[in-house]
């Protein structure tokens, strides 16, 4: 994470050309200068020069951002806009602290076996008091307006049994036997799969089995730290990175894979950044990160899955389109692999949508800090999906799945949302 000096230098590299303004999803909705990268950088610079105070308004402008990276990608001067925004959020946390609810959630995620982790399970049991069924596939709708959540919002139910507690997964919680002739793969579930979508984890294990690899699932794994990092809580994110590094180092594998785009970005890049302050840890984390592959990347580029273990062709093919998660497309450069898997699945007919790379609106904590903005950003995505005529929208990130289901429900688009691995 940038310190104040690096942050000032980064801001100094901005030539205020405004290219970032034209690609920003929040600016498309809000249409004001402070919502785009150029405006935010100007505000951050003004704060660091003492020209403005860290007011409520300043904090709001900094948080009006999905951390999607479109500005960073398009910037002709290569300004690390996302790095600057995360550093600005860290300055806010250093001065004001994190909201109480966010602190509690992060504590539960770093110690799932502890008291606060148990609270997540209790919340799962009580969710029916506040949420009612929308449809079996889509999720639950809040019965009335709740703090943070709001009313009428489609939410994923907390899993009755987490992925890591499933009996199938517990049998994989041991190191793979030495001398195994096939590739050895460790699976990192992440919070989305573990707490909300264990079925995506099961589907991932299914495709890995069909690809003929030996699998293990280290049970000591915890949250990847990306939520803490994007909130500006670097210490918690670092502690999570270290816990995961130690958890996976105990397992001798060729690859570490995940079916969450955000976790994959964290495991590949964020861990290196967070643990770079210690040379010994830095070497260890480089070896760890070099093994990490998104599940679509692993299946396509390393395991030759396409054409090897396909499902039978259905009588009538299902039309599917694909939404690019920002953390897979921009952060990891993975676009071709999920499309290749879908296009070659015998039961699917692939159709590209308009603006497949536009942000769904979930990222950067926007769906909790500013839900109205977040769901308005999703409108364009819902319209693109409707125009494509697809029956199913595939994606590769549990977070995007949550947001897309809510958006399709909100804007009345009749399409299902699934992870790529559930369709193979
Ligand atoms: S595109 Fe880059 S250089 Fe241009 S205004 Fe935006 S951040 Fe500054
Ligand atoms: S990260 Fe995305 S939402 Fe945030 S300023 Fe850049 S383009 Fe806009």
Image (tube, rainbow, N blue to C red):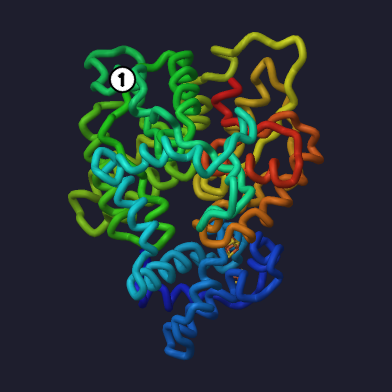
Q: Is residue 92 visible?
A: yes
Q: Locate residue 355, reporting x and y percent.
A: 72, 47
Residue for point 50% across, 41% down: 129
For ligand 2, the image quadrant comes to bottom right
From the image, which quarter does the C terminus lie in? top right
Q: Which residue is mark 1?
A: 172
Q: Locate residue 112, reporting x and y percent.
A: 29, 40
Q: Locate residue 63, reporting x and y percent.
A: 52, 67
Relative to 231, say whether 292 is above or below: above
| Quarter assignment of residue 186 | top left
From the image, which quarter does the N terminus lie in? bottom left
Q: Classify residue 359 as left or right of residue 89.
A: right
Q: Locate residue 378, reporting x and y percent.
A: 67, 51
Residue for point 43% across, 15% down: 209
Residue for point 50% across, 45% down: 332
Ligand 2 closer than 8 Å to label 1 CB: no
Q: Secondary structure at mark 1?
A: loop
Relative to 154, say whether 163 is above or below: above
Q: Classify residue 147 as left or right of residue 247.
A: right
């Amino acid at each position: 994470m940038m310190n104040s000096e690096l942050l000032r230098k980064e801001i100094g590299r901005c030539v205020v050309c405004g290219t970032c303004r034209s690609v920003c999803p929040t600016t498309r909705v809000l249409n004001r200068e402070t919502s785009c990268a150029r405006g935010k950088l100007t505000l951050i610079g003004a704060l660091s020069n003492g020209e403005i105070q860290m007011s409520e308004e300043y904090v709001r402008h900094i948080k009006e951002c999905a951390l999607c990276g479109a500005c960073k990608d398009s910037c002709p001067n290569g300004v690390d806009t996302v790095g600057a925004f995360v550093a600005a959020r860290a300055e806010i946390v250093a001065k004001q602290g994190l909201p109480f609810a966010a602190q509690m959630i992060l504590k539960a995620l770093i110690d799932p076996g502890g008291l606060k982790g148990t609270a997540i399970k209790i919340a799962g049991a009580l969710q029916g008091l506040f949420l009612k069924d929308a449809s079996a596939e889509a999720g639950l709708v809040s019965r009335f307006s709740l703090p943070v959540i709001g009313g009428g919002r489609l939410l994923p139910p907390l899993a009755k049994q987490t992925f890591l507690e499933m009996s199938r997964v517990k049998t994989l919680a041991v190191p793979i036997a030495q001398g195994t002739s096939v590739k050895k793969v460790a699976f990192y579930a992440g919070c989305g799969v573990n707490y909300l979508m264990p079925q995506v984890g099961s589907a991932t294990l299914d495709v890995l089995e069909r690809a003929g690899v030996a699998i293990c699932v280290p049970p000591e794994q915890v949250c990847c730290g990306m939520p803490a990092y994007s909130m500006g809580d670097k210490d918690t994110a670092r502690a999570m990175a270290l816990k995961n590094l130690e958890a996976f180092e105990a397992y001798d594998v060729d690859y570490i894979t995940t079916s969450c785009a955000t976790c994959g970005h964290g495991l590949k890049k964020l861990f290196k950044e967070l643990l770079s302050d210690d040379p010994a840890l830095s070497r260890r984390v480089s070896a760890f990160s070099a093994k990490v592959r998104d599940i679509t990347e692993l299946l396509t580029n390393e395991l030759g899955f396409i054409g090897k273990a396909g499902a039978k062709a259905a009588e009538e093919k299902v039309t599917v389109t694909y939404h690019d998660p920002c953390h897979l497309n921009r952060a990891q450069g993975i676009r071709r692999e999920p499309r290749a898997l879908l296009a070659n699945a015998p039961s699917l007919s692939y159709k590209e949508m308009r603006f497949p790379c536009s942000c769904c609106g979930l990222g950067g904590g926007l769906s909790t800090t500013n839900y109205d903005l977040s769901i308005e950003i999703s409108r364009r995505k819902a319209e693109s999906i409707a125009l494509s005529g697809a029956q199913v929208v595939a994606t590769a990130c549990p977070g995007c799945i949550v947001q897309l289901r809510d958006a399709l429900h909100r804007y009345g688009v009749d399409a299902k949302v699934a992870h790529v691995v559930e369709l193979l």
